[in-house]
Amino acid sequence: MGSAEKHALTQAVKAYAHRLGFALAGVARPNPPAHLDVFADWLQNGRHGTMDYLANERAIERRRDPRQILPEVQSILVLAVPYHPPGPLPKRAADLQFGAAAAYAWGADYHEVLPERLQALVSFLEAQVGESIPNRYYTDTGPILERELAQSAGLGWIGKNTCLINPTRGSYFFLAEIFLGIELEFDPAMTADHCGSCTRCISACPTGCILPNRTLDATRCIAYLTIEQKGAIPIDLRLQIGQWVFGCDVCQQVCPWNLRFARSPGDPAFAGSTSAQKPDLIKTLALSAETFNRQYKNSPIRRAKRRGLLRNAAVVLGNQAKDTRDERAAEALCVALHDSEPLVRGHAAWALAQVGGPAARQALQQAAESELDEWVRTEIQTALTGVQ
C-alpha cells in the first residue's frame, strides 16, 4: 500500500469512527510501552490492592509486547468516546438522602456498548481493503496500558491524576483500542505535558491516593474502595468516602482542563437519569437481590454487586447524616443492620454510630445480642463505643 493510499484509508476510518461516536481517533505504533517499568514498580509495591489479575505473569508479558496479543499487528487504532461531564464539585449534598455516582456509570455499561462499534470499524476497514484483517479489540478489558497507548496515538497526555487529558476535550472519555494486522498512517505521540505546576487534583483527593509519579495507590482510591474492594472498607477511610456511592470524580472535577473544555454533552448512550446520578441511599439499602439485578442489569454499577453497593450506601448515609440524628437515616440503617449480608450489617453498624442518638444505640445493643458473625460483632462493639 502506497503512502497516499495509506493516508486515504486512515482518514476514512477516522471519519467513520467519528460517525460512530468516537470523538478522538489516532493510530499508534505497535511498540513495547515505554513506561512498563513504572507499572511493574506499581505492582511490586502492592498499589493494585486486590486486583490480582493485573499482576498475572501472562498478562504482564502481553503488556510488554503488543505482538503477544496479536502476532500480525502492524498498527493500533486508539479511540475515545466521551461520557457526560458531572460538572463542578458540589459544596455539600442538597439532601442527606442522596449520594453520588461517578459520571461514567450514569448510563449504559460501556463494556456492552462499545464492542459493537469496534466491530463495525473492523468491518468498515475490511470492506475498504477487500479482505479480512487480523484484529483484536478491547475497551478496558485487555492486558494493555490503555492511557500510554492513547498518548502514543496523540490523543492526549497522562495527567497528574493518572487520567488521559485531551487539550481541547478534557478527560471524560472511555478508551478503546483495535489491534490491526494492517499498517495505517501513524500519528505523532503527544509529548507535551500541560499539567505544568498545577496540583489541584492532588490537593483535592479526599484520601490522598494520588502519587507523585502519575500513578495512584488504588488501596486508598475511592473508586477502588467502592467498586473493586470486595471486603470491608478500612475504618480510617470511611469518612473520606464522603458522598460517593460508586466511583469518584473529584480529581477530574477540579482539573482546569475539564472546567474549561469538558462542558459539551457526551455520547447519548451514557446519559443515564437523575436517579443514576444521585442514588437514593434509603431506597438502595432496601434493594433485594432480584431488584438489584433488574435495576442494574445494563449498568456498570452491577460490578459492585448488591452487597458492595449496599455497603457503600450505608457508609455514605452515615457520612451524610453524621451528627444530624436524621430519623430517616437511622431507620434505614437499623433495617440494614439485619441484612442477609454480613458486609452490609457491619457497615450499617458503623454508619449508625455516625448518625448517633438513642435509636441507633438501642439498635446496636440489640444487634450485639443476636449477631453470630465475628467480624460484624466487632464492628457493632466498635460502633457502640463511638455512638453518642
Image: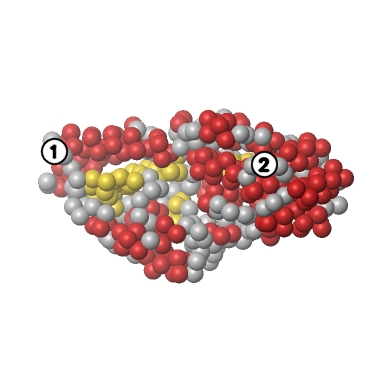
> Looking at the rendering, which quadrant does residue 64 occupy?
bottom left
Mark 2 and mark 1 residues within 8 Å of each other at the beta carbon: no
Rounded to the nearest angstrom, the CA distance separating label 2 from label 1 is 57 Å
Question: How many numbered discs, if any?
Answer: 2
Percent x, y for residue 297?
49, 33
Q: Disc 2 residue type?
A: Asp
The residue tagged with tag 1: helix, strand or loop? loop
Quick check: can you spot residue 328? yes
Look at mark 1 in the image and give the residue it sits on.
131
Looking at the image, residue 150 sits to the left or right of residue 228; the answer is left
Near-viewer residue (223 or 91): 223
Above or below 373: residue 121 = above
Percent x, y for residue 2?
12, 47
| The label number, if any, that marks residue 102 in the structure image | none
- Residue at x 23% of width, y 57% of height: 67
Look at mark 2 in the image and give the residue it sits on.
339
Q: Disc 1 residue type?
A: Glu
Above or below 267: residue 228 = below
Quick check: can you spot residue 190? no
Which tag, 2 or 1, sits closer to the chain's start? 1
The residue tagged with tag 2: helix, strand or loop? loop
- Residue at x 63% of width, y 45% of height: 341
Percent x, y for residue 299?
50, 36
- Residue at x 20% of width, y 55% of height: 71
Percent x, y for residue 35?
38, 65
Figure coloring: secondary structure
- Residue at x 35% of width, y 63% of height: 57
Of tags 2 and 1, which is closer to the observer? 2
Q: Residues within 10 Å of mark 1 (few under 14, many from 20)?
A: few
Near-viewer residue (127 or 333): 333
